[in-house]
Image (spheres, helix red, strand yellow):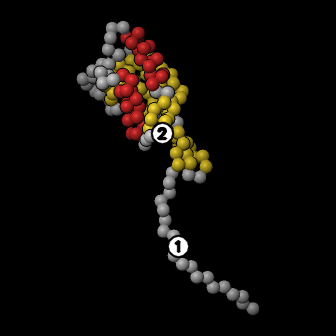
Amino acid sequence: MLNNLIDSIAIKLNQEFGDGVAIHKEQVKQGLKEPCFFIMLLTSNQKQVIGKRYFREHPLDIHYFPSTKDKNTEILDVVDRLNDALEYITMGGDLVRGTKMYHEVVNDVLHFFVNYDLFVYKESEASDPMETLTVESGLKG
């Protein structure tokens, strides 16, 4: 499910920014070509709500590496576009809403933080039903 979430974000980024901006799901050690995005899941947690229903929180950090000399102007433009584009993503045919959006700029790299929190229902494995049961009872007396 987490890979589907990251794939859904990558699809949404591609729709918004086009093929001219690379989207990475793994860190690039050498040869990074700017502009580009890097999607990173920070942590993940799950809390049981009732029965087989769980609430999962997924905070993500989306890095943006700008390419122009006017990095601040480019970053602020990207922040505006990300706020609109990542408010809703489609994952498995369902809309998932992004919350807790904020950004930071560190060493000319944009860090855009967004949470995708959702409820999940865990299906249990079907077990074989009992075939027959014979009960004999009586009183001793």
Q: Which residue is depicted at the point 53% across and 29% down? A: 99
Mark in front: 1 vs 2:
2
Does 127 sit above or below residue 53? below
Nearest to the observer: residue 91 or residue 126: 91
Check disc 1: other Cα within 10 Å, few if <14, some if 14-19, many if 20+.
few
Q: Residue at x 54, y 42 (%)?
A: 119
Q: Amino acid at mark 1?
A: Met
- Above or below: residue 2 compared with residue 53: above
Q: Position of residue 3 (x, y in %)?
A: 39, 39
Residue position for label 1: 130
Marking on residue 94: 2
Residue at 69% over, 87% down: 138
Q: Position of residue 122 (x, y in %)?
A: 51, 51
Specify the amino acid type for callout 2. Asp
* Rendered position, 84 above or below 68: below
Q: Residue at x 41, y 10 (%)?
A: 72
Q: Is residue 132 visible?
A: yes
User: Most extreme residue toward the bottom, as rendered?
Assistant: 141
